[in-house]
Amino acid sequence: MRREVARPKEAVTEIKQGKLDLADVLIIMGSAIVGFLTKFLVPEILEVVYVLAYPISLYFLLSPSDVPNKKTYQVVIQLFFKDNRTYPAMPKSKEETDEL
């Protein structure tokens, strides 16, 4: 007879296939096509750099960040749209105000 042991849901983890999802890889490959189709917008000497900049920049933006369950572009969006009250300025000490 086979004996089954119950395990908590927290112990079950997702299997990762790598750093990027299939959708991320397809977006990166598609960005190279977009760069190739729009290379007429830049001077001829910069065309190769322009076409390569699309997939390279998207690779860095779509790769996972140090923040759990967030991609780099999500962290950048949070950085730009954070509220000023998130990190309030520290009040000046009495010594600094006396020097002024």
Image: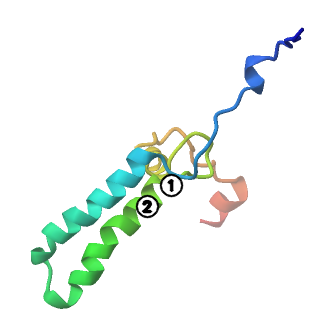
Q: Where in the figure is residue 43, as x and y percent of width and height?
A: 14, 86
Q: Where in the figure is residue 10, as x and y percent of width and height?
A: 75, 23
* Residue 59: assigned label: 2
Label 1 neighbour load within 10 Å: few <14, some 14-19, many 20+:
some
Does the residue at mark 1 contact the one at mark 2 (Cβ under 8 Å)?
Answer: yes
Q: Secondary structure at mark 1?
A: loop
Against 18, residue 35 (above or below) is below
Q: Where in the figure is residue 84, as x and y percent of width and height?
A: 47, 42
Against 33, residue 46 (above or below) is below
Q: Quadrant of residue 57?
A: bottom left
Q: Residue at x 89, y 11 (%)?
A: 3
Q: Residue at x 33, y 52 (%)?
A: 27
* Residue 71: assigned label: none
Quarter of the rendering occupied by the N terminus: top right
Against 26, residue 100 (above or below) is below
Task: Check disc 1 and give the amino acid type.
Answer: Ser
In the picture, measured across the screen, residue 32 lies left or right of residue 37, that is: right
- Whether residue 80 is visible here, answered yes or no, is no
